[in-house]
Image (spheres, coloured by chain):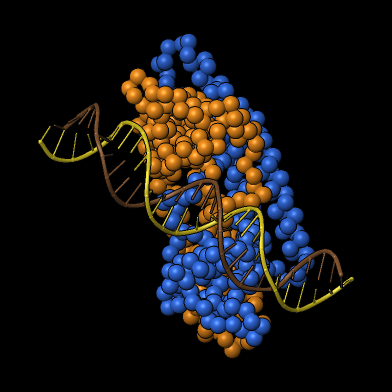
Chain colours: A blue, B orange, C brown, D yellow
Amino acid sequence: MSVKQALLALLEQEPMYGYQLRTEFEARTGSAWPLNVGQVYTTLTRLERDGLVEPAGADDEGHEIWRLTAAGHDEVAAWFTTPVARTQPPRDELAIKLALAVTVPGVDVGTLIQRQRSATMGALQDYTRLKRQADASTGRTDLAWSLVLDSLVFAAEAEIRWLDHCEARVRRVATESTPLIAPARFERDEQEAGR
Amino acid sequence: MSVKQALLALLEQEPMYGYQLRTEFEARTGSAWPLNVGQVYTTLTRLERDGLVEPAGADDEGHEIWRLTAAGHDEVAAWFTTPVARTQPPRDELAIKLALAVTVPGVDVGTLIQRQRSATMGALQDYTRLKRQADASTGRTDLAWSLVLDSLVFAAEAEIRWLDHCEARVRRVATESTPLIAPARFERDEQEAGR
DNA sequence: CGACACATGTAACACGTTACATGATTTG
DNA sequence: CAAATCATGTAACGTGTTACATGTGTCG
């Protein structure tokens, strides 16, 4: 879904040709999410099918230019005015993995969390390195790419915090449920209220 | 991709039938990411095609049971021991939207951020409400579902922080670049900020 | 000249989503 | 009995990914 909207948004700025769309997209997102050129063309075909873009002939150098239709402009406007729905967020593989790891017996949740933690830390370091590099290369930092990088950083930091949180909770459950089995269960609600 | 792995992981715990897989998946993730039953069956077919699961006949009530093959067990083990790759994270629609919003002229980034912020805040409140509800209903909180909820909360909080960060940066760029162009343009920027 | 970036496509495939069809069983 | 839930599928479609084919222009 994002690719369609992104191409439309780019065409809102100015009619372009396919290859250019790829270049512009990657320039703005700093190649954080590389976009296959082929997909640009297939997506353009589908957008034309849906009446959102239309061919506008060739430019001076013979490039096949695409422009938005009226419906395409409306679509872009709607996209920019409607917030991204958090009602049905995309499935988070890591959250699913951990949720299953704590329920499926025989999985070492501790090392799973540790491994993930260091992997995410590594990604975080890559981001900060990229950030330094981006700030150094161009005198004026590219705002869009910089914001995308920040987004990745914020998400990675949140992931690490969540992992630490999970580790603590899992450890607490492990140490707390073992002694619970033998003695009477009087204080069940007391212990739950503690967390 | 997550669905395939999730079904395999569930079958690692115990052989099950299709409908049961849906139920178990949603129980663990608290219906945060609803899973269409139909997809369970199509995915099972594809997993069988790939030699990861195999039919194991019917149980007492006539349900079609599926179990992991040896390759399926390996796949699960690999999934749980390999961290989720952050090298190519899934495209973040919000980050893309904002990156394009700041580069495409005529987009009111301020209200875009504000709208998104309140939408995400709303989602966050839903999560905390769900959290209270989950803790209240069952005496013993379901760990998996609780961790998933925490994940959503952490992500939403990070998103809000990022949005605030973006707002500040965008505003700074606006106030710092505007006087450079021409002092005469006061009114237009006032109007932009207003709407 | 040979390698590489530019430029446009196409075919095949994987995954996910929706909608529909069908029937058994349970429950108010 | 009617409605809801349980249970198993299938067909069609949308989006995204990969790989391939093809040709032009540029630069060392």
Q: Is residue B119 above or below residue A66?
A: above
Residue B147 relative to residue A119: left or right: left
Q: Is residue A103 above or below residue A30?
A: above
Residue B62 relative to residue A93: left or right: left
**Where does residue A143 sit, x and y in percent of width and height?**
64, 68
- The quarter of the picture where residue B137 lies is top left
Residue at the image point whose x is 42% and y is 19% from the top: A187
Quarter of the image with the C terminus of chain B is bottom left
Residue at the image point whose x is 67% and y is 49% from the top: B87
Q: Nearer the viewer, residue A155 or B63?
A: B63
Residue at the image point whose x is 40% and y is 16% from the top: A186
- The quarter of the picture where residue D20 lies is bottom right
**Where does residue A43 sit, x and y in percent of width and height?**
52, 65
Residue at the image point whose x is 52% and y is 60% from the top: A2
| Residue B164, visible in the rendered structure | no
| Residue B78, visible in the rendered structure | yes
Residue B160 relative to residue B57: left or right: right
**Where does residue A148 sit, x and y in percent of width and height?**
62, 60
Q: Nearer the viewer, residue B101 or B178?
A: B101
Quarter of the image with the N terminus of chain B is top right
Q: Is residue A57 above or below residue B63?
A: below
**Where does residue B182 sit, x and y in percent of width and height?**
63, 87
Q: Residue furthest bottom?
A: B184
Q: How many marks?
A: 0
